Structures are given as structure tokens and as C-alpha cells.
Amino acid sequence: MMNASIIGLAWRSLLNRKASALLTILAVALSVALFLGVDKARNGARAGFDNTISGTDLIVGAPTGQINLLLYSVFRLGNATAEISWQTYQDITAREDIAWTIPVSLGDSHRGFRVMGTDQTYFERYRYSNDTPLVLTQGERFEDIYEAVIGAGVARELGYKTGSEIVLTHGLGSAGLTDHEDRPFIVTGILEPTGTPVDQTIHIPLEGMTAIHVGWETGTRSPMADTITEDMIRDFDLTPRTITAVFVGLERRGSILSTQRALNTRQGEPLLAIIPGVALGELWQVTGVVERALIAVSIFVIAVGLVSVLTSILTSLNERRREMAILRATGARPGHIFTLMVAEAGLLGLVGSLSGLVLVQLGLALLGPVLSSSYGVQLQGLGLSMIDLWTVLAVTGAALLIGTVPAATALRRSLADGLTVKL
Amino acid sequence: MISDTAAVQIKGLKFAWTEGPALLDIPAFELAAGERLFLRGPSGSGKSTLLGLIAGVLAPQAGGVDVLGHDMASLSGARRDRLRADRLGVIFQMFNLVPYLSVVQNVTLPCRFSQTRRQAISGDPVEEARRLLARLGLNEEKMLQRPVTELSVGQQQRVAVARALIGGPSLVIADEPTSALDADTRDRFIELLNEEAARYGAALLFVSHDATLAGHFDRSVDLGEINRAGAIA
């Protein structure tokens, strides 16, 4: 009762100094928003990446770093430096401990979206986010060599529907000189949104990938290419000579390490087999250093915000000596004065950190869709978490603690001033 | 309330600030219960210090100040605070009001700090505050809604009287409450203060340097006469 009434006084006192209180609350809110924002971005990115691939036991590609292989094969980030031969792919598929394989061939693009050559097993076997299969919302899978199935993000961004014609670009450049305009693809299906890079991908058959590159063996279009007709292409053997990577599902998950070792040490073409979860773990180790630095910086920024709480209350003390004397005269005990000051600091901390929380939630609600459409990674766990709660509690607690500094000053002065303050 | 207990009784009081000569040396002084006393003293004569000692925010170094039957020297700081909260009303020279509270909230302020004061009011403290304000001529609703900093000095001082009297204190201390008022307002203010203090049966210790006000009160005392330290200076 008594304390509630003091907090009421503290609140009115803050309202009386609106401008200064609002600036202080803003400082605390921005610092808390930065901290929570960094934390959310970190956890969101991790959850998003972790959800991108599920059920795939091994990823096999040409020797490179395991993070590199993971990034270009699953997240379409960066480029493959080497490929593996079709024969090697056949050898892998033939192994008895392997249940299924998905071939992946990357390298071309369409208006900034990556093109991936694959086969029907992709639609049957690929899983994301806790064993969720890919589902078509429109149309059907590709059947012919010049057909394509596009991710939900591609469809939304470029406004494509089933039946749309798309011209692929050689490599990753913007549309122009290196277009495969002579051989457009027809969109036959659109996938459900997944919140993974699949949304940003155009899927075509491996044969289609080979077909558009007939006459491009040197990397650019040869003068001979124009003389090759559609019928001639269809008569060619369109089996690819190389692919970029293979997603592998095992018969028994228990054999994952031995199969990985067998592939990594096999005779013939050298290979790199990685376990997606392990590679992700290594990636987080690398990014962890940066994350910790960001967290440390944002904690310092919160400290700055708290210092502004201290400053705003300390600077108000001089003009409030009279007020303290009045409160003392009307019966306030030293404890009341102390509580009043601490409560003001606590209220600034509480309102500030809650505002910061709201700011982050608003920011994520506005920015989330932009991030997910540009990077194909959804920020997950946007809702309130325990971290939010603890942050608000910790900042409020720290503000209360800091409040004891001006509180002690006000207490000392009000005891010395008594009832006689000449202003 | 025991009516024959003196509101204030001083016997052999000595007080000095930490470094300096004795400021107060009062062999004897008494304010009877319900008595309205005028204490005259020029500024610098130690009257504010004396009020601080009576209000219990300062502690005497020697001798006794008894307030409402309590020996202030033997009470702990917390007990002195409680006594002040429960049974004393204080009116300052000016700037009596807390700027961020409304007129009525300023009047009910003592009820925030004292259970006794709140319980002494039979009904709602807010209603009691409005009754007190109305008797002091502050009943215009528009005026009550204004920020206290926009009230005239005379109005502010009357709000302070209402605050000092809410919850029926036994002793009201007024430190130069009229020095910022013009002559007409001042006389009316003192009449109101006297009337209301009498209505509540509260003793009134009215301190001022202006000897012409003495006629309004039961008795008049010159601080210079009772304070031996002051006489030397």
C-alpha cells in the first residue's frame, strides 16, 4: 500500500519531467532493442539454417571445405570450385549402405535466382524442417527436359504462374549477353513456401541443364551453337557429364560415420562427404566469435543506456531539493525518499526495456518478410522468449541498482537540509 | 488526546551546527495544547533551526525538546519521522506544493505517509481535502484542476494550510507563511489559519519576523528573549 503509493509518486514525478524522461526511456529502449535484435537475428538465422535440411545424412561433393560444400549445395551461397563426375555419382548410388541419392547440379541463374538441376528423387526424398516433404501448390513436377518447378519465393517475386516461360542465364550474372534465350523453360509447378533457400530456387531436370549447355562447352556460346536444332539436341545423350553435389540418405543412420569415411577415402576421384549437422556446427563455431563480439557490444550499449538513467535522475536532484523537503515535512521518512528515487530509476528501466522489446517485435514483423525473401532464410522464434523476459528483468534490476546512487544522494541531502531549503 | 500535555515543551535546549558557536540556548519554552502562539524572530536568529528541532528533522545536542509528550532526543530518527507524519502539520514560507501533484493530491499527501492521518478521516481523504479547501475559499472546480504551479501565492499558501490540517494533527508549525502575501491577503490568511487550527483543536506555532502580526494570536514570544545564545549575538 505504502510502496504502491510511492511508485505512484515516482510515476507522476517522471511525467512532470516528460522530455527528459522520454529521452532516457528512448536511450534504454534503443539499447535493449539492439541487444534483443542481435540475439533474435542470431537465433533466427541458426534456426532458419538448421531447418533448411532434414533427413539428408550426407552431402557429397568435390573436395573443398566442409562449410563451403554445405553453403553452396544447400544454401546456394557461393560457388562450387569443382564438380564430380557422373560415373562417380553412379558408384555412390550403387553402394549397398546408401538408400537414396539426390543429384544436384548448380551454376546457372534466372534474374538473380539460382537454377538447380536435379531429378525426381528430389521431390520424393528432400526434407526440411523436421522431416517436412516438398509439396506443390500449383501444377506438377517437371517431366520434359524444358520444364521447371519454381520455389514459392521465385513465383511471388517474379509473378510467375504455371505456363510462364523463363530464359536462364549462364552463370550467375544478370540477364544479358549470356542468356540461354534459344531454349526457354516452361514453369510446370510451384512449390509451397518452405522458409528455406528452396523458395528461391528454380528446379529443372538434369537433362535440361545439359541441353541448354550444348554448344557452351567452352563456357561461352560457340558460333556452332546456332546450327544445332532442337531435334538434334533431343537425339543427343543428355546424361550430364558432371554434377555439383549429391544428397545421400543411408539405409541405416548408424552407419553414417563409416560411410562418410569410406567415401572420403575411396580410390579414384577424390570426394568430400559431410554430415550437414556437423558442418553447420562448424559454421556456428566460426560465426560464434562475431556473435559474441556483437553481444558484448550490445551489452555495453545497454550499460550506456543505464548511465543515461543515472544522469537524468542525478541532474534532476538539485532542482528537487525543495520537493524533498516538502515530502519530508509532510511525513516522508528517509526510506520513502530513497524508495522514490529508486522507483524512478526502476520505472525508467522498466518502461525503457519494455519499449525496446516492442521495438524489436515491430522491427521483426516489418523486416522478417524482407529477410526471408532476399535470403530465403526465415527468422524463426520471432515471438516472445525467455530471453526477452530476462532482459527486461535484468535491465529493470540494474536500473533499480543504479537508482541507489541518486537515492543515497537525495537521502543525505534531505537529512542535512531538513525543512529549510532556501531556493 | 490528553489536553494538558503541552504541545511543545523545551527545557535547557542547546544546539549548534557542527562547526560554530551555539545557535540556540533556550532554558525554557512552552506551547500549550491547542494554544496559538506567535514566535517573533528576525531572519538568522535560529528560528528555522528551532522549527527543525521541534519537527524532529534535527536532533538537539543537549537538553530536551518534548513534542506532544515525546522527548525528541530519546526518539530514534524513524520514531521522530513517524511522530511528524502522524501528528504534525508544516507550512513553509513559499513553494509549499509538490509540482507534479494536483491541488487535491497535494492536500492528501500526508495520508500517503501516515496510516494514522488517513484513519483519522472518517470518509474519503479526497472528499475531506475538498471540504478543507472549500472552507479556505478554494472551491472553484476550474481552479482545483489547474497545475499547482499556476496558482497564486495566496492560493498556494491556503492549499498548504489544508494539507497541514488534513487528518487532524495536534500541532501545526508555520514558518513565515505570510511573508510573500500582500497585507489584505495576509490578514485574511492568518484568520483562516487560526479558525481552522481552532476547529481541529491543533496548537499553532506561527513564526515570523513581522511583529505587527502578533495581535492575531493568543500569545506572543520573542525568540531573542528566550534564546540566550541569540542575546549574545
Image (tube, rainbow, N blue to C red):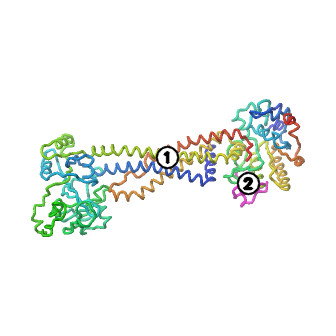
Main secondary-structure element of the magenta-colored stretch? helix
Which element type, helix, strand or loop, lies under badge 2?
helix
The quarter of the image holding the N terminus of chain B is: top right
Which residue corresponds to mark 2? B130
Q: Residue A263 lies in what quarter of the image?
A: top left
Q: Is residue A407 above or below residue A86?
A: above
Task: Please name the residue shown 68% across and 40% down the image.
Answer: A413
Looking at the image, which is closer to me, A31 or A176? A176
Left/right placement of residue A364 relative to residue A225 reads: right
Q: Report if residue B38 lies within the magenta region.
A: no
- The magenta span reads B125-153
**Does any portion of residue A422 appear in the rendered image?**
yes
Disc 2: CA contacts within 10 A as few (<14), some (14-19) or many (>=20):
many
**Residue B65 coordinates in the image, percent (x, y):** 79, 34
Percent across and percent down for residue A173 are: 27, 62
Occupied quadrant, residue B3: top right
Chain of the residue where label 2 is placed in the rendered structure: B
- What is the number of the mark on residue B77? none
| Residue B114 position by quadrant | top right
What residue is shown with label 1?
A302
Residue A57: x %, y % from top left: 23, 46
Residue B62 lies, in percent from the top left, at 78, 29
In this rendering, the answer to whether B22 lies above or below A129 is above
Q: What's the amino acid at mark 1?
A: Ile
